[in-house]
Amino acid sequence: MEFKELTLEELTLGYAKSAQDASCTCIFCGEIYEEGIVYRSRGRMVTAERAVQEHIFDQHGGVFRGLLNLDKQVNGLSQIQKDVLTGMYLEKDNKLICEEMGISAATVRSHKFNLQKSKREAKILLALLEQIEDESIVKQRKIIEGETPAEEELPVKKDFSGNTLHPFFTQYNLK
Ligand SMILES: [Zn+2]
């Protein structure tokens, strides 16, 4: 299974559900669980979807660890980012994380801030690429564009004091 082809939903679930036959494929090892077959897992019988969920937990340490342990070329994470994320995943407070990592509380806070910043930027990049790559979005845009008046007739939009997003978003420091 090619990680670069997976959707955000599949990455988040840890398995890909086939649109054709509803079979579930583990994204970490490619094991397939067929819909309509009952699987034995943890000593009892479960559905395909439950079986793949338990398989991911039992064989790959769960989705979080599976994604975290991917090659740096794939997830782009440094060791320090992985350690901070693991601390957050285990619901440790900043004090405990910085003690265990041997770094200052300010550094932990800074890493957390940068992770959230990367998340916001990643979402905007996703939305931008959807404008280019999603056929239905492109098609709809062309319909809308076709119905707008000529460019010189378009009303000039006031920008919000240098921030082109609505003021609502300024609380997220998107400037
Ligand atoms: Zn697997």
Image (cartoon, rainbow, N blue to C red):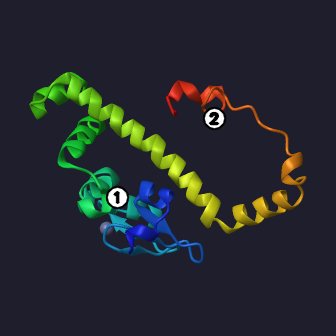
The single residue placed furthest to the left in the displayed view is 102
Q: Position of residue 20 (x, y in %)?
A: 60, 77
Find residue 140 and report its image quarter: bottom right
Asked if disc 1 and disc 2 are in contact, CB closer than 8 Å, the reply is no
**Above or below, comparing residue 167 to residue 72 in the picture:** above
Q: How many marks?
A: 2
Three-letter code for the amino acid on which mark 2 is drawn: Leu
Visible residue check, residue 162: yes
Q: Residue at x 9, y 31 (%)?
A: 102
Helix, strand or loop for disc 1: helix
Identify which amino acid the numbered label 1 is placed on: Glu
- Dot 1: within a 10 Å radius of its alpha carbon, few (fewer than 14), some, or many (20 or more) residues? some
The residue labelled by disc 1 is: 54
User: Which corner quadrant of the figure contains ligand 1?
Assistant: bottom left
Q: In the rendered image, which quarter contains the N terminus?
A: bottom left
Give the percent coordinates (x, y) of residue 148: 88, 53
**Residue that numbered label 2 is attached to:** 165
**For the point 31% across and 63% down, which residue is it?**
74
Task: Characterize the local packing of mark 2: few (<14), some (14-19) or many (20 or more) Cα atoms within 10 angstroms.
Answer: few
